[in-house]
Image (spheres, grey):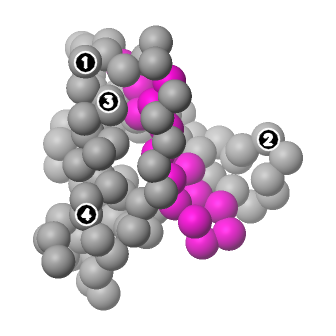
Amino acid sequence: MLELDLQLTAEQALDACRRHGLVVQSERELAGRGGSRHWHLRVPGRRGTLELNEWQGKVWVKVHPLRDGGWASDFARELCALRRTRSNAASGDRE
């Protein structure tokens, strides 16, 4: 399983996902982690799922090996390369 910490806010990560054509398939709280947020994101018409998580100021992505779909691990690494910015409008800018 691939799991990477992001240097983005959850909102910045979601914006980057939307710009790349991903849509939120589901959103819920992580079991046993009150106040957390957990999203499953997909590319419509393609296999694969990217999991985005936020809890206590930490944001990370996960890709299960059987849910990669040929794109999710690569995209998770792209998200990991992005850095937090002061403005959500600039969330896709690299430092």
Q: Residue at x 42, y 60 (%)?
A: 6
Res 74 → quadrant:
top left
Q: Is residue 85 magenta?
A: no
Magenta span dominant secondary structure: strand
Q: Which mark sits nearer the N-terminus, 2 or 4?
A: 2
Label 2's element? loop
Residue nearest the viewer, comparing 37 with 6: 6
Give neighbour class at mark 2: few <14, some 14-19, many 20+ (Cα, 10 Å).
few
Mark 3 or mark 2: name the one nearer the start of the chain: 2
Which amino acid does the dot numbered 4 rest on? Leu
Dot 1 falls on a residue whose secondary structure is: loop
Which residue is tagged 3?
Answer: 72
Q: Which residues are magenta?
A: 48-64
What distance separates the C-alpha of mark 1 from that of mark 2?
Answer: 28 Å
- Marks 4/1: CA–CA distance: 21 Å
Q: Which residue is located at x 38 percent, y 67 percent? A: 8
Q: Are marks 3 and 2 in contact (CB under 8 Å)?
A: no
With 29 as the anchor, is 39 left or right in this view? left
**Residue beneath disc 1:** 70
User: Residue 84: where, in percent of width, then height?
Assistant: 33, 75
Residues at marks 4 and 3, CA–CA distance in whole angstroms: 16 Å
Type of the residue with mark 1:
Gly
- Residue 31, label in figure: 2
**Disc 2 residue type (three-letter):** Ala
Magenta span has 52? yes
Task: Tell me which amino acid carries mark 3.
Answer: Ala
Which image quarter: residue 22? top left
Q: Are marks 1 and 3 in contact (CB under 8 Å)?
A: no
Indicate which label's residue lies in the foreground, 2 or 4.
4
Mark 3, mark 2: which one is toward the viewer? 3
Q: Which mark is residue 82?
A: 4
